[in-house]
Every structure is written in C-alpha cells, then in structure tokens.
Image: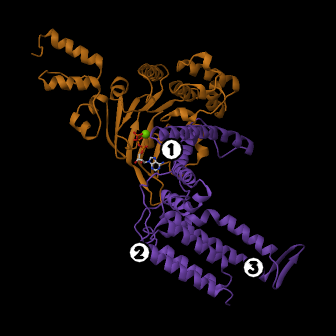
Chain colours: A orange, B purple
C-alpha cells in the first residue's frame, strides 16, 4: 500500500491561542513495500506525521492518500475503520497501552476489534507472541508483572496480531537492551522481506537507518527537509550536523580516517561496507602512514 | 480533549495578571457574594458592568469566555426550565397539576441564568489569568491561620498543586492511550452502551496504571531530594501585594457596596 501526502498542513489546537503549526506543506510519497526511515530532531513533527497515515490526526488542509483511501480534514472516523485494520502503529513507549488480565488477551484485543473470530484471534496472538520471542510461560501472566522490555514485546505483538500491511514504528527500540534492540530490528527486517510489509520507522539511531532503510525522510521544524536513499541523505555531513543529526557509526569512522588523509571511493554506511573498503585499501598497500 | 478550559492559564501582562493571586481569589469570592445578593434589575445591571470591567482589564480574548460558558449552557437551561415550571408567586399564566408558569418563576429563571453567567465569566478571568501554582500558593497563604488549629495547610496546598499540575499530563496521557487503542481497532464512538463501557476499560486501566506509577515515582523523587513536609520550607514564588491589588480591592469594595445599595431598588 503506497502512502501519499498532498500539501498537508496540520495545526494542533486550531483556533485557540495555543495554535501550533506542526506540519507545513508536506508533499511526499512512500512506495508500497519500502522500508522508510523518518529522522529529524526532537519536536520536528515525526510523530505528528505518522499519525496521519491511519487518520488518528486529520490534515488541517491538504490530503493523505493510503492505497485507495483519501483522508481529509472532514473524513469521518467510521470511514477509517477499514484503513486502521491495515495500518498498525507502534507508538512511542507502547507498553502504556496494555490493559488486559493476561498477555494473550491483550494481544487478542486488536484482532477481535477488527471482527476476527476468537479462535483466529488466538492463533494470530500466539504467532505474534512467538515472533517477538515472548516465552510461552508468560502468556497467561498479567502484563503488569512483566519487565519494561517484555511489556514492549507484548505491545508490539498486539499490533502484529492485527496483520497490518503497513507497520509504523515510533522509536520502537528506545529503552531496550542491546540484544532486545537487535532482535526487534531483525524482526522488523524479516517482516519487511518475508511478509512484504511496508515499514515506516521513526528513529534517532542513524545505524538503524543505514542498516535497514531503503528510503529516508528528514523532517525539520514541521517540513520535509530531504527525501532520498540513505546514501544520498548521509552524503552531506555538514548539512546533517546543521540539522542536528548525525552519521551512522561506520560513516563516522570513515570520516575520521578521511580527515587523516585516507581515501575512500564512497562513504561506507554500515560495518560491512566499511570493513570491505578498509580491506581493499590494505590490499593495494595504500595504508595510512 | 483539547477544548477543556478548566485550569487553562493564558499568560499575559494585563492589570489583572499582575495582581496578587490571593487578592484575586478573595475579590472573586466577594464578587460572587455580590451577585448572589443581587435581586433587582439595577443590581444585576451593576454586577454585569463590573464583570465587563474585570474582563476588559484582563486583556483575554472574548472567545475564551464563550468557551467557558458553552459547556455549561445545558445546565443553565435545565435550571431555568425547572424555575419556570416550579416557581410560584405573582401572576399565573399557565397551570397544570403541580406545574405552573408564573411571573415570579419567569423572573427568577432569568435572574438565575444571569447569575450563572456572571459567576462563570468572573471565575474564568480568575483561572485564565492565574497559573495553577499561583492559585494553590494563594490558598496556602490564605489558610495559614488554620495552621494553629492543626489543619494540615502545607500538605493540602502541596496536594492541590500536584493535582493541578497533573491535569494536563493526564489529559495528554488519555489522548495517547486513546490513540493507541484506536489504532488497534477500538471504536469508542459506536456500538451499544455496554460495548462502549467495555472498551472504556481499555482506556481506564492503563490510565490508572500510569497515574499510580507516576505518583510513586514522584514520591520517590521527592524523598530522594529530602522532602520532609512543608514545615520550615522557604518559597520560590513569594507573594507580594502591589499597587494593582490596592486599586483592585478599592474598586471591588466600591462596586460591591453599590450592588448592595441597589438591592431592592426597582
Ligand atoms: N498534543 C499536542 N498538542 C499541541 N502541540 C503538540 C502536541 N503534540 C505535539 N505537539 C507539538 O508539535 C510539534 C511536533 O511534535 P512531534 O511529537 O510530532 O515531534 P517528534 O518529531 O515526534 O519529536 P520526538 O523526537 O521528541 O518524538 C512539537 O512542536 C510539539 O510541541
Ligand atoms: Mg515523537
């Protein structure tokens, strides 16, 4: 399902003195099946942007088109149920949405809301919990007895169980330990490749952008500052720094070597590329003094 | 959700903004008493004029006042209807069982509506021009004499300011949880009352959960920073009466006196 924004403006608390123009003239297209990273400094409008994709927020002016559904400021919530079935959003700190008596019941909440039978919901919930590597002994426990990281997994499973075609992740790994972080990112990559989900990832981790995304949107004070592939976006270090963003660690490392006189054919974005290029340098005896 | 006006503070630099919160609180009460004492057209007219002057010197956009009155229109109409049908005395225009429409009933209905509106307007000025922290500071200061009677003034003031402080946080939190559950297909605007109530559970439980854990965290953070009750604590915001307060007080005393004098005048 492709996503298109056409001249979208969004104002929080319109018509009050607290008005806050949070999105300004957004025009963009996110192709079906892409893995798009959305980056930008704090308060640049990333969370506001993604909430437009399933109509939780409606454009003040302009329109958002998802697949064949158009969302404008006057679209009724009733017309959005169908869309929400296909767009799953994992919010920032999603563990705050848990409420049911048991982990499994909580994960079943979404599918049941979308009219799936109890057996089917159970099946989907079990498979989602397995995907997020939640051991079976926890399934009947209360979600409030879990650790923060485990709650996060359950919350993510709760979205996966609705079988979305577009999966939106708002800083899904913030606050997880390194292993949990890696497992989650690998799960999302797998869903993207095997189940052909369109993924939108809001993140402050440039390494995740370099490792997983094929498309990057840079937000700056409510506007789109740049759209392109990771290579395009990370090619201009100075521009990134000016927008309070950084480089992936491999590119950073390469930049340091460059400043010491080492030549790179192309700035490497991930560790693999960096290692390859350094080995190539060595092979040619082109070593740094 | 964002339309809730309660406790909403609009920063500003007007005459009223610069007054001491204690003076504002006491003078608002004085005004409310004056409005309740009014019982003639002239007295109401004067009260209305006072309200206009107060609103004028607060420099807050008229739209806010409309927003303050709007949610209460239903309540006002209901009270008016009850007055109209159950009020007795004066000329009887219509009569059916215990219901009757009388001239006194009609007059009282109009008076009650005016009272309601005037009180809402002036308390809106108070809450819009005074930050919640100032209000709780004012209450603390005004209740200080009760300390002698072992009334827990500090604790009450602290509870009040924490409660006021967390109103917007809870509203935000509710909105967030609401959005998260909506994304999971929960539809809060359709279905029977029973299914809607059931869906509400998915909002209330996370909300309580987060409120309790917030409270616990706050308590821990306060203890970690050595909080041990209000006794002997100095204040960051020191309240001081200024020229504005004297002017405001003189104005309000004269205004209230005039309302009282115009009572019974018809
Ligand atoms: N509910 C709200 N009411 C009013 N203004 C809001 C609300 N939510 C966000 N904003 C404002 O909108 C702007 C964009 O916020 P948004 O949450 O989209 O930023 P973000 O890019 O997700 O930031 P972060 O990286 O911190 O999550 C900010 O200026 C913020 O203050
Ligand atoms: Mg955000």
- Residues at marks 2 and 1 touching, judged by CB atoms closer than 8 Å: no
Question: Residue at image x 65%, y 71%?
Answer: B116
Q: Mark 3 points at which residue?
A: B106
Q: Name the residue under label 2.
A: B243
Could you give the CA–CA distance between mark 3 and mark 2, rounded to whole angstroms? 43 Å
Category of crowding for the residue at label 2, using alpha-carbon neighbours closer than 10 angstroms: few (below 14), some (14–19), many (at least 20): few
Some atom of ligand 1 lies within 8 Å of the CB belonging to the residue at label 2: no
Q: Is residue B42 shown to the viewer in this render?
A: no
Share a chain, discs 3 and 1?
Answer: yes
Share a chain, discs 3 and 2?
Answer: yes
Share a chain, discs 2 and 1?
Answer: yes
Q: Earlier in the sequence, mark 3 or mark 2?
A: 3
Placement of B264 over or under A157, stated as above or below: below
Q: Which of marks 2 and 1 is nearer the N terminus?
A: 1
Tell me the subunit letter for badge 1. Answer: B
- Please state which of residues A288 and A146 is positioned toward the viewer in this rendering: A146
Placement of A167 over or under A53, stated as above or below: above
**Ligand 2 image-quadrant field:** top left
Residue B228 disc label? 1
* Image x and y of residue A105, in percent: 65, 27
* Image x and y of residue A142, in percent: 63, 26
Category of crowding for the residue at label 1, using alpha-carbon neighbours closer than 10 angstroms: few (below 14), some (14–19), many (at least 20): few
């Amino acid at each position: 399902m492709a996503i298109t924004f056409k001249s979208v403006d969004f104002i929080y608390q319109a018509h009050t003195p607290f008005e806050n123009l949070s999105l300004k003239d957004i025009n963009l297209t996110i192709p079906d099946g892409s893995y798009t990273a959305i980056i930008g400094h704090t308060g640049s409008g990333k969370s506001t942007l993604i909430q437009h994709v399933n109509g939780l927020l409606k454009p003040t002016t302009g329109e958002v088109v998802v697949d064949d559904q158009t969302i404008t400021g006057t679209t009724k919530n009733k017309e959005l149920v169908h869309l929400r079935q296909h767009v799953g959003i994992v919010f920032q700190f999603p563990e705050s949405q848990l409420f049911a008596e048991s982990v499994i019941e909580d994960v079943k909440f979404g599918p049941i809301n979308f009219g799936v039978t109890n057996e089917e919901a159970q099946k989907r919930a079990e498979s989602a919990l397995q995907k997020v590597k939640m051991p079976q002994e926890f399934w009947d426990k209360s979600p409030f007895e879990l650790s923060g990281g485990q709650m996060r997994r359950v919350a993510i499973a709760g979205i996966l169980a609705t079988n979305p075609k577009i999966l939106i992740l708002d800083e899904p790994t913030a606050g997880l330990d390194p292993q949990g972080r890696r497992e989650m990112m690998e799960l999302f990559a797998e869903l993207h490749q095997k189940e052909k989900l369109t993924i939108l990832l809001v993140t402050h981790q440039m390494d995740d952008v370099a490792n997983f995304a094929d498309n990057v949107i840079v937000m700056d004070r409510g506007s789109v500052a740049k759209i392109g592939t990771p290579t395009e976006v990370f090619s201009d270090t100075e521009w990134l720094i000016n927008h309070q963003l950084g480089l992936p660690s491999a590119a950073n490392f390469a930049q340091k070597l460059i400043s010491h006189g080492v030549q790179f054919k192309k700035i490497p974005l991930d560790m693999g590329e960096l290692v390859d290029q350094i080995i190539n340098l060595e092979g040619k005896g082109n070593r740094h003094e | 959700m964002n339309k809730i006006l309660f406790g909403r503070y609009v920063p500003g630099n007007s005459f009223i903004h610069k007054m001491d919160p204690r003076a504002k609180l006491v003078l608002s009460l004085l005004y409310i008493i004056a409005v309740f004492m009014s019982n003639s057209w002239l007295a109401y007219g004067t009260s209305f004029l006072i309200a206009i002057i107060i609103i004028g010197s607060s420099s807050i956009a008229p739209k806010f006042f409309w927003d303050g009155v709007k949610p209460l229109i239903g309540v006002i109409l209901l009270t008016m209807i009850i007055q109209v049908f159950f009020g007795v005395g004066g000329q009887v225009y219509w009569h059916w069982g215990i219901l009757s429409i009388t001239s006194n009933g009609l007059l009282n209905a109009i008076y009650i509506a005016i009272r309601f509106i005037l009180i809402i307007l002036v308390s809106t000025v108070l809450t819009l021009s005074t930050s919640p922290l100032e209000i709780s500071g004012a209450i603390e200061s005004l209740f200080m004499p009760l300390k002698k009677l072992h009334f827990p003034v500090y604790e009450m003031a602290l509870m009040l300011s924490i409660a006021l402080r967390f109103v917007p946080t809870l509203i935000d939190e509710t909105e967030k949880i609401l959005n998260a559950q909506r994304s999971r297909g929960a539809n809060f605007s359709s279905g029977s009352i029973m299914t809607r109530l059931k869906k509400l559970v998915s909002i209330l439980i996370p909300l309580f959960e987060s409120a309790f854990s917030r409270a616990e965290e706050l308590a821990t953070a306060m203890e970690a920073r050595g909080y041990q009750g209000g006794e002997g604590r100095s204040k960051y915001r020191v309240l001081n009466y200024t020229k504005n307060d004297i002017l405001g007080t003189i104005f309000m005393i004269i205004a209230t006196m005039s309302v009282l004098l115009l009572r019974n005048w018809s």
